[in-house]
DNA sequence: GTTTCATGTAACAAATAAAGTTACAGAATC
DNA sequence: GATTCTGTAACTTTATTTGTTACATGAAAC
């Protein structure tokens, strides 16, 4: 099944913005992921409303972080994207009037709810600054020629 | 996004089979979910290989449970379905050579891995017998006229 | 104030994947 | 041997995301 990559892509974009002094245009960002400027704008629109990024038009315009990276939790980004459905698999709405269908949904739901709660908790514990630090660590390794196996 | 309902549908089917003495044909099961017999066979094929159900052709043929409901964990069913991707959202494979991409994936992965582990653990703790019990409880309520709000 | 460069958004096209369908071969009962 | 079921391949349909085009709007530079 096709995976929703908005969250990963957004984080990627946000780090680029954090590492960049001037605003970045949609086109610059689009080149980073090999996608389309309009896709970038669409995705960023939600993050702007969530107060995570700001956009400016005209010459020298583009996208900038509105908060410090340490102040942006992955959960915030996820929410800014409109909280897309987390699970592929899962109890669909009990569609039929069949009681078995309801029993199945009720039996499965707690497991998925718990997993979702844990995931959101973890996403709340990671900030953009953490991801940036991870990136800098990697960049330092590469400079020293200690490239990872991955 | 479209949700993979195979797990919920399979469980639904398995309960029907548990409640039914004789083998159930693909067509009977298909009617339960308002779907197609071929879809049922396709889904059940994996469960047969996992040793959860058995199928027989010819007159009086159809699908039967191969193990006791108390012996069938939801996790087994999930595995029998080929372990479809659990998450919609999530770190895609780090596609670009960009180090930031890798950093993002590495930062997100533990959160998703933990959530997945928890979910699988919960699915391992629920058996088909539990779901059947949930169903019987509901059926009893309806008989007594104490229908749920849901 | 006009030009230029950027976002904002609507409308449409392409790509992808699940689900549904048709068709027919193969196996088990009667 | 006829009937009734599964097994499976091939195709169609449908839903959703992603990509694209087009153009209106707004901000800075000159």
Image (tube, coloured by chain):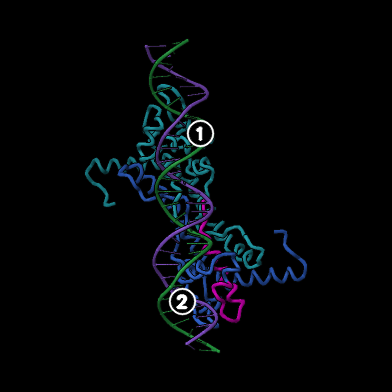
Chain colours: A cyan, B blue, C green, D purple
Of residues B33 and D28, the one nearer the viewer is B33
Quadrant of the rendered structure where residue B59 is?
bottom right
- Residue placed furthest toward the left: A145
Q: Secondary structure at mark 2?
A: loop
Q: Is residue A142 visible?
A: yes
Badge 1: residue crowd in 10 Å (few <14, some 14–19, many ≥20): some
Q: Give the residue number, with chain letter if any, for mark 1.
A: A48
Circle 1 marks a residue in which chain? A
Quadrant of the rendered structure where residue A97 is?
bottom right
Of residues B95 and A17, the one nearer the viewer is B95
Residue found 23% across the figure and 46% down from its top: A146
Magenta residues: mostly which secondary structure?
A: helix
Residue found 35% across the figure and 38% down from its top: A32
> Magenta includes B11?
yes
> Magenta includes B109?
no
Q: Secondary structure at mark 1?
A: helix
Query: Between tags 2 and 1, which lies in front?
Result: 2
Q: Give the residue number, with chain letter if any, for mark 2.
A: B51
Q: Is residue B17 above or below residue A34?
A: below
Residue A104, image x and y in percent? 60, 65
């Amino acid at each position: 099944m096709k995976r929703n990559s908005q969250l990963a892509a957004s984080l990627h974009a946000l780090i680029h913005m954090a590492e960049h002094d001037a605003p970045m245009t949609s086109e610059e960002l689009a080149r980073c992921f090999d996608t389309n400027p309009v896709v970038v704008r669409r995705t960023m629109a939600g993050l702007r409303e969530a107060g995570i990024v700001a956009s400016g038009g005209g010459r020298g315009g583009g996208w900038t972080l509105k908060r410090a990276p340490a102040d942006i939790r992955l959960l915030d980004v996820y929410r800014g994207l409109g909280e897309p459905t987390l699970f592929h698999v899962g109890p669909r709405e009990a569609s039929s009037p069949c009681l078995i269908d309801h029993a199945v949904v009720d039996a499965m739901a707690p497991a998925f709810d718990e997993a979702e709660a844990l995931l959101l908790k973890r996403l709340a514990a990671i900030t953009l600054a953490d991801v940036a630090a991870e990136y800098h660590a990697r960049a330092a390794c590469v400079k020293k020629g200690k490239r990872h196996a991955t």
